[in-house]
Image: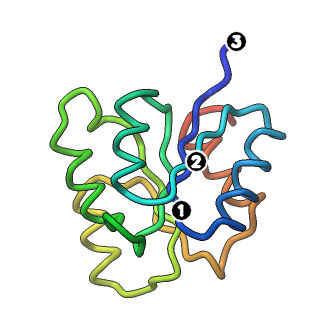
Amino acid sequence: MDKKKILVVEDEAPLLNALCDKLNKENFEALGARNGLEGLEMIKANKPDLIIMDVVMPVMDGLTMLYNLKTEPELKEIPVIILSNLSDSEDILTAMERSTYDYLIKSDVSLEEVVTRIKTRLKMI
């Protein structure tokens, strides 16, 4: 069975590295990007099975990246889980309107929970 590709788009290096390390240990192929623009380029090049992304990032923020992603016919079906410090209901509503699967608040979830959400979304559990 091929490993599922997960793209992590996160500008905080420690969290990006921790998520990628955890996903690799869980038998995923983890890819990392530091901002929304880099994330979009990696999505086009690698066609990940799922994307985990932050909202507040330099160069291109997560909601702009999500908007761009959802306008690309061959990419818009890729499931997205937002992992952010923002708990503002307007950001959450915007993300949900753009077909995001899950909106997780960084301070409320562990790496284990993130992996469980990914596996659930990819119908692995």
The residues bearing labels 1 and 3 have C-alpha atoms spaced at a distance of 28 Å
Are discs 1 and 3 less than 8 Å apart at CB?
no
The residues bearing labels 1 and 2 have C-alpha atoms spaced at a distance of 8 Å
Res 73 quadrant in image? top left
Front-lying residue, 14 or 55: 14
* 23 with respect to 95 (left or right): right
Pointer 1 residue: 10
Pointer 3 residue: 1
Between discs 1 and 2, the one toward the N terminus? 1
Pointer 2 residue: 32
Res 88 quadrant in image? bottom left
The residues bearing labels 3 and 2 have C-alpha atoms spaced at a distance of 22 Å
Q: Amino acid at mark 3?
A: Met
Are discs 1 and 2 less than 8 Å apart at CB?
yes
Between discs 3 and 2, the one toward the N terminus? 3
Query: How would you rate the neighbour count of disc 2 (Cα within 10 Å): few for under 14, some for 14-19, many for 20 or more?
Result: many
x, y (%) of residue 82? Answer: 46, 62
